Image (spheres, rainbow, N blue to C red):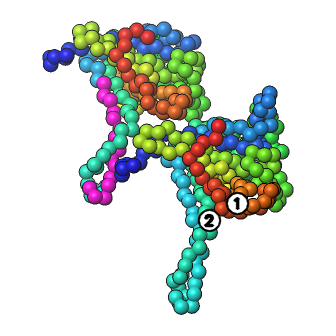
């Protein structure tokens, strides 16, 4: 691919998860993870990966310059200012991000996302994605390719720290959201790799996906 | 088409509003005392590259960020009632002319064109000689300046009207197409 201006084009934010984001429709999909449209942004959605490295010092190299650096994984911050959005989906995202799988149960959005889960509730709950007990949200940014625009998926994300700024008045509300994506996940370990007949139940970082470009369906 | 003088000819202004309004069908608004002016406002943005001097230098590439249109006219032979109805809609569609709706009322109302709650109007300008009639799909009268100051006296009133035409859509995502394919104006007759 040659060097060129990169123009991502228009992007639609979609989310998928369980808990408050579970499907509430009648039928076979009831209670399963569902992909929702969250909204469109007023201005560019900003992705900010944060890499973590750790210096290794040895005396021979002195106290200031590392002789080696260790890769210590990464996380991503995603900020967006939504102007055309589904408020009921946003409330579901807040509920999941607050660890409260029990905040919903009505498709009409009559959830109390402001109700706490217990302090210390693990967001992943030692469950795979889209399994009850895992509150993470799969954050999808769908771009319509104009000049090679990219889709982005952050499989395990949540609204973090100061998650939302929500002005309320006569003018249209712009919901400013602050997402954090971390590399939670269960690695795929083949039997051949471990030479065992059962798959060990360990959480390891190798192979864990922080982001990819394949959208959920 | 060969090079020639362009003569628009007589230009009748007609408009059409949403269902339930007094102008739900195509309705004559009036005639102007002088040429009606159509001014497209193109919005472009430079891409600055340091090798070309950055923000100080000329851009090696430019992006197009759509347009709106300003239409200016001085109405001299017009339907006073129809003008009131257009004013009412341009003021956010309160039930009575001169009455205010809620602050922040939406002009498009998240409905389809011509559906109840749509406060834009469709604006047409005929072209009796040039045969290039303009059709602006979503227009409203702007406030201030030439926005409909109405002179009152013994002489005939010439009412300056300034319109703004925007590319209204219900869903800006457009099934992934965004603004692509949204019509700002066309040259079709009828409505």
Q: Position of residue B30 (x, y in %)?
A: 36, 11
10 Å crowding of disc 1: few (<14), some (14-19), many (20+): few
Residue B17 marker: none
Q: Main secondary structure of the magenta part?
A: strand
Decide which of A148, B183 is in the foreground and name it: A148
Tag nearer the camera, 2 or 1 = 1
Q: Are marks 2 and 1 in contact (CB under 8 Å)?
A: no
In-image side of A160 versus A144 (left or right): right
Q: Magenta segment, which residues?
A: B38-52
Q: Earlier in the sequence, mark 2 or mark 1?
A: 2
Q: Which residue is mark 1?
A: A193
Q: Residue at x 44, y 43 (%)?
A: A148
Q: Quadrant of the C terminus of chain B?
A: top left
Q: Quick check: A74 above or below B99?
A: below
Q: Residue at x 57, y 27 (%)?
A: B110
Q: Is residue A85 visible?
A: yes
Q: Quadrant of the N terminus of chain B?
A: top left
Measure the alpha-carbon separation of dots 2 and 1: 22 Å
Q: Position of residue B96 (x, y in %)?
A: 56, 18
Q: Position of residue A102 (x, y in %)?
A: 83, 45
Residue A73 marker: 2
């Amino acid at each position: 691919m040659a060097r060129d201006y990169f123009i991502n084009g228009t992007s639609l934010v979609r989310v998928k998860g369980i808990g408050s984001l579970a499907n509430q429709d009648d039928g076979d999909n009831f209670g399963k993870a569902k992909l929702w449209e969250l909204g469109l942004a007023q201005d560019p959605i900003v992705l900010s990966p944060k890499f973590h490295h750790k210096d290794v010092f040895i005396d021979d190299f002195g106290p200031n310059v590392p002789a080696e650096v260790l890769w210590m994984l990464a996380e991503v911050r995603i900020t967006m200012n939504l102007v055309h959005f589904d408020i009921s989906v946003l409330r579901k995202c807040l509920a999941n991000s607050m660890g409260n799988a029990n905040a919903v149960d009505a498709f009409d959005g009559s959830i109390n996302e402001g109700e706490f889960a217990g302090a210390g509730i693990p967001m992943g709950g030692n469950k795979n994605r889209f399994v009850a007990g895992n509150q993470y949200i799969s954050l999808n940014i769908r771009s319509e390719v104009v000049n090679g625009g990219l889709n982005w998926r952050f499989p395990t994300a949540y609204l973090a720290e100061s998650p939302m700024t929500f002005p309320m008045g006569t003018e249209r509300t712009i919901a400013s959201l602050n997402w954090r994506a971390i590399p939670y996940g269960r690695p795929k370990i083949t039997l051949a790799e471990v030479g065992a007949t059962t798959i060990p139940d360990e959480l390891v970082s190798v192979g864990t996906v922080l982001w990819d470009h394949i959208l959920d369906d | 088409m060969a090079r020639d003088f362009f003569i628009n000819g007589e230009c009748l202004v007609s408009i059409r509003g949403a269902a339930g309004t007094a102008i739900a069908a195509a309705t004559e608004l009036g005639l102007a005392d002088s040429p009606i002016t159509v001014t497209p406002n193109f919005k472009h943005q430079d891409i600055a590259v340091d090798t070309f001097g950055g923000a100080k230098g000329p851009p090696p590439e430019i992006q197009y960020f759509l347009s709106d249109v300003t239409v200016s006219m001085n109405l001299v032979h017009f339907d006073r009632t129809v003008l009131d109805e257009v004013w009412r809609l341009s003021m956010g569609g309160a039930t009575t002319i001169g009455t205010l709706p809620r602050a922040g009322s939406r002009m498009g109302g998240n409905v389809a064109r011509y559906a109840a709650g749509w406060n834009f109007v469709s604006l047409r300008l005929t072209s009796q000689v040039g045969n290039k009639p303009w059709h602006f799909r979503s227009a409203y009268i702007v406030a201030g300046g030439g926005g409909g100051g109405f002179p009152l006296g013994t002489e005939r009133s010439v009412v300056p009207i300034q319109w703004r035409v925007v590319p209204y859509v219900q869903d800006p995502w457009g099934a992934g197409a965004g603004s692509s394919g949204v019509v700002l104006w066309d040259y079709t007759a009828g409505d």
